[in-house]
Image (spheres, grey):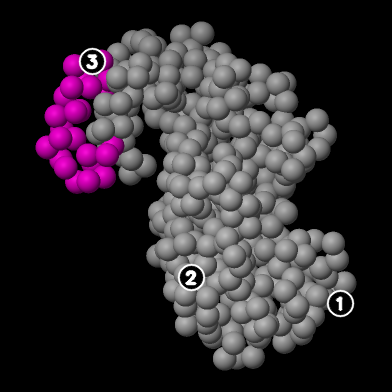
Amino acid sequence: MTLRFRNTLGGALEEFVPLDPALVRIYSCGPTVYAPAHVGNFRSFLFADLLRRYLAWHGYPVKWVMNITDVDDKIIRDAVRQGMPIGELTASHEAAFLEDLRRLRMMTPDVLPRATAHIEEMVALIETLLEKGHAYRTDDGSIFFRIASWPAYGRLARLDPSQLRVGERVEADDYGKDDVRDFALWKGPKPGEPSWRTRIGEGRPGWHIECSAMSMKELGPSFDLHTGGIDLVFPHHEDEMAQSEAATGRPFVRTWLHCAHLQMGGQKMAKREGNIERPAEVYERGFSPRALRYALLAAHYRAPLEFSDETLVAAAAAVERLSTFLAALDAYREGRPDDPTMPALLDATRAAFSAALDDDLSISPALAALFDFAREVNRRLDARALSTADAVRVAAFVRDLDRVLAVAEEDAAELPTDLSTLLEERAAARAARDWATADRLRDELAARGIAVEDTRDGQRWRRAAEVEHAGR
Ligand SMILES: [Zn+2]
């Protein structure tokens, strides 16, 4: 079975063929750091994490970029309201976002570029668009993209260009442009707003140009995959595609993937609707980060998902079943010959898991394959029909599938704080290539009953008792 994705561009299910098999390049629209992210935002980020993990599990080297939007209308509005510089407002929300990301076991993107650190790249891109006649200036120093200059406009969202931009957020950008459909690349300076003095004049970037500049800087003019929530298709991604392709003359993105909304009480979860819940609030109600991760991942990314207590209770039960299954395997001892049918069962389960995810990341049949397998193996454990070595192999197999899901293993957050602090310090020492400190912390953790191993997915820990059993 080959890996296939439903490409928003064109709408077809397409075989995934990397532009460069040596490095699959992914860009995900990240958070706008003006408020803490809510679980609806994290549905979209976790979908990108699933994609990234699955490609890695498939053996593809991946470069994953997720931007941090740290200047835009909402940030400026809230900073003014709270009487602080925008950098102060965004720094605290960015730190909170990274902490949420860690607790939800998202892999850290390879690059997390900030918009305010890429003004030069945006200016260069806008200069190119001006030179090529795709952009124009207005009296107040703003610069707009001229949609009439780009006949392909509307291709991603499959919209008729003549029908575009009725009633969406153009008002705030409207500084006397030639055509109501045109969008701002650069916004002229206004009193009380942050601005940059640049070769194209003083002002600040529009939101869309930020993503084009940062993605192409990190991934080149053409890259494989671009993800985001469904509400970003238009205008954000349509505008990104138009301005990028108009500037480079090359196809911007091979495959666009969009995640459906998370709903609560039958409505899209959105700050504007007032029906949001943040990860920390979910944990306060007694659900673990693992359960939240599972709840957000367990529905297909293109299907709307209703977020409720029932969803979380079911997710908590599922991750508990997996933990119990692993604990039972780790503890199992039986001096008898290996089960001769086990290799075929492992192969069939792996094939079903992988065939499901190959089909546009169809998660439900993948999870069904895993839980059916757990049920069957539990039956054999109860019947004492497996050898100790069988149990060790099955546990390793489940942990391998969990490289994609990241829900089965216990969480460092479930450890006493001093131990999780030691783990964090060791991860930091490794990242800084301070091997002496990393080794010392490994010994210290071992003395406290926590065994640490280094894998290609980073540092992994287990309670020493489990390691001892698994190794026997
Ligand atoms: Zn974006």
Q: Is residue 250 above or below residue 235?
A: below
Residue tagged 1 = 162
Residue 282 lies, in percent from the top left, at 60, 24
- Closer to the camera, 460 or 234? 234
The disc, 1 or 2, on the residue closer to the chain's N-terminal end is 1
Q: Amino acid at mark 2?
A: Trp
Which residue is located at x 59 percent, y 84 percent? 129
Q: Is residue 412 left or right of residue 8?
A: left
Q: Is residue 240 above or below residue 371?
A: below
Which residue is located at x 54 percent, y 46 percent? 83
Residue 140: quadrant of the picture: bottom right
* Label 1 to label 3: alpha-carbon separation: 67 Å
Question: Magenta segment: does it hold 171?
Answer: no
Task: Rate crowding at label 2 as few (under 14), some (14 to 19) or many (20 or more) other CA atoms within 10 Å.
Answer: some
Which residue is located at x 83 percent, y 70 percent? 164
Residue 11: quadrant of the picture: bottom right
Main SS category, magenta section: helix
The disc, 1 or 3, on the residue closer to the chain's N-terminal end is 1
Q: Is residue 448 left or right of residue 266?
A: left
Q: Amino acid at mark 3?
A: Arg
Residue tagged 3 = 448
Q: Tags 3 and 2 in contact by the CB under 8 Å rule?
A: no
The magenta region covers 427-451
Residue tagged 2 = 196
